[in-house]
Amino acid sequence: MNLSLYLATVLIWGTTWIALKLQLGEVAIALSIAYRFALAALVLFAFLLLSGRLQPLSRRGQGICMAQGLCLFCLNFLCFYTASQWIPSGLIAVVFSTSTLWNALNARLFFGQRIARNVLLGALLGLSGLACLFWPELVGHTASRETLIGLGLALLGTLCFSAGNMLSSLQQKAGFKPLTTNAWGMLYGALLLSLYCLVSGVPLHFEWNVRYVGSLLYLVIPGSVVAFTTYLTLVGRMGPERAAYCTVLFPVVALNISVFVEGYQWTLPALFGLVLVMAGNVLVFSKPRAVPGTAAGKLA
C-alpha cells in the first residue's frame, strides 16, 4: 500500500511541471494557484459529502487546517514561484529536497521522534545526487543580490512545506483523515490567495482555452486532490522524513520526461547523480538493523 502511494505521488508531482508551464500566460500566478485550490477544495467537499466521509472538525481542528492552508496551499507556492524569477529551477529543486532533513528535524523537535541515521544519510545522498544532476545549471548562474533573495524565498517555501507536513501529521494523530483536512486546508489556502490578489491589485482574469483549462484540471485532480492526499497519507503512515524523500525524486521524473518533451540529454555527471539519488532512496526506506545487546536486538 505504501509503495503504491509513494509511486503515485512521485509520478504525479514529477509531471505537474508540464501543466505549470502551460499555466503561464495572461493569468497572474497567484490567481492561477487560487483557482487550482478553490476547484480542488470543491471537488473534495463534493466527494466527501456524497460519500458521507466528511469528518466534523473542532475549533482547534479548523484552526490547524487554516494554518495548514497558509503553509501548504498558499505561502510555499508563492515563495517558489517568486524565487523562480531569480534563481534556476535546478537550484530550487535542490533547496526543496532539503525538506527531508527539515521534516526529520521538525518531527524530532515537535513530536520527539528519533532521527534515523539511514534517513539522514539517504537524504544527504539524494541532495548530492540532485547537485550533480543540476550542476551545469548551478555553476552557470552568477551570484548576486537577487540570487540571495531567491535562495531565501526557496528556503522559506521549503520550511512552509515542512510546517504543513507537521500540521497534517498532528491532525492525523488526532484521528482526522487527510481528505477532510485537505479539503478545508485547500479552501483556506484559496481564500488567502484570493485576498492577496485583491489587496495587491491583481486583475481578475481567466483564459477560456484548451491549454489553460486542461492544465488547470490536471493540477486540480491528479496534482492536488490525488497527490496531496496520497502524500499526506504517507506522512501519517511512514513519518514526515521518509515521505519527504519524494521531493528528491520529483526532479528525476521531470528530467526523464524532459528527454522526450524538451530534448534533455543525459550526461555522465547527471547519470552519477541519478545513481546517488536511487541509493539515497534505498537507504531512506531500509530498515535499520537491530544492535546486539539492545532490546531490539534481543527481540530479533
Image: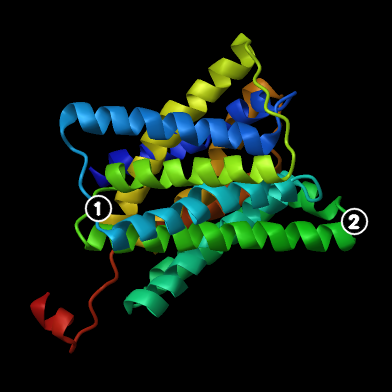
Amino acid type, callout 2: Thr
Foreground pick, 134 / 89: 89
Q: Quadrant of the C terminus?
A: bottom left
Residue 124 in which image quadrant: bottom right
Please provide percent x and percent y for residue 127.
59, 60
What is the x, y in percent for residue 252? 56, 41
Name the residue at 28% across, 64% down.
287
Dot 1 corresponds to which residue?
57
Residue 226 in the image: x percent, y percent? 37, 34
Point out the tag, 2 or 1, that comes first from the N-terminus: 1
Q: Where's residue 135, x and y in %?
A: 75, 52
Residue type of the residue flagged with mark 1:
Leu
Which structural element holds mark 2?
loop
The residue that mark 2 highlights is 142
Give the color scheme: rainbow, by chain, secondary structure or one colour.
Answer: rainbow
Q: Relative to 213, is 272 above or below?
A: below
Q: Name above or below for residue 205 compared with residue 157.
A: above
Determine whether, in the image, residue 296 is placed left or right of residue 221. Answer: left
Disc 1 crowd rating (10 Å Cα; few below 14, some 14-19, many 20+) is: some
Q: Secondary structure at mark 1?
A: loop
Q: How many marks?
A: 2
Q: Alpha carbon of mark 2 to alpha carbon of mark 1: how far?
A: 49 Å
